[in-house]
Amino acid sequence: MTRLPSAVRGSVLAVALAACLAACSSGDPGGSSAAPSPTGSAAVPSATPSAAPSATPSATVTVTVTESQPSVPVSTPTPSRSGGITKVDEVTGQLSPVGKESIVVDASDGPHEVHLTAYTVVLDTQGSVCDKGAVPHRCTSEQLIKALKAGVSFEAKVLITDGDAVKVEEIVKD
């Protein structure tokens, strides 16, 4: 048996590897797709040993490499309560309590029920909700509910995100 030179063996291995990769990346695991038009070819030179001129092995391998980018649908993320703010409103009107953790803002476009949280900032300018600190007094949502239930009249501008009051700021009309 005749040994091929190492350069020829390396070329044959490279061509065989390229053919395998092209077949694997074609996207048809069964290999039953029609042969696409060749975009590149590699020919392996024949090796002619000097001892046996009649046994001249020659091989020509055509390698087709097609690059296709898979179609990936692009989706726009939709914000959720855990992933971001979906709606921001600012309403102004008379406040009234609803339960322990909600208020109704009677605005010009109708009533808005708003949930109060522990992080809701309540700014009171007249001291009718709380009177500690500098004006405007920074009060808690519990103090606001307590004052509203006690009959305090309170008109405010309310910043709402996703149904929760972020800031309640008293409006004083001159």
Image: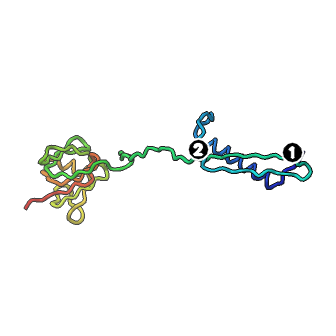
Q: Which residue is mark 1?
A: 55
Q: Which residue is mark 2?
A: 37
Which quadrant is the C terminus positioned in?
A: bottom left
Residue 167 falls left or right of residue 54? left
Tag 2 or tag 1, which sits nearer the N-term? 2
Residue 149 in sight from this viewpoint: no
Q: Position of residue 14 (x, y in %)?
A: 72, 50
Near mark 1 (Cα within 10 A), the count class, few <14, some 14-19 or many ≥20, is: few
Residue 159 falls left or right of residue 70? left
Residue at 14% in and 53% down: 155
Give the amino acid at mark 2: Ser
Residue at 31% in and 53% down: 119
Front residue of 65/152: it is 65
Residue 80 falls left or right of residue 25? left
Mark nearer the viewer, 1 or 2:
1
- SS at badge 2: loop
Residue reaching furthest to the bottom: 134
Residue at 81% in and 46% down: 57
Q: Position of residue 71 (x, y in %)?
A: 47, 44
Q: Position of residue 171 (x, y in %)?
A: 14, 58
Residue reaching furthest to the left: 174
Which quadrant is the N terminus positioned in?
A: top right
Q: Tell how many labels.
A: 2
Q: Position of residue 114 (x, y in %)?
A: 23, 45
Residue at 62% in and 33% down: 30
Q: How is the image coloured?
A: rainbow
Front residue of 150/110: it is 110
Give the amino acid at mark 1: Ala
Marks 1 and 2 in Cβ contact (< 8 Å): no
- SS at badge 1: loop
Q: Which mark is residue 108?
A: none
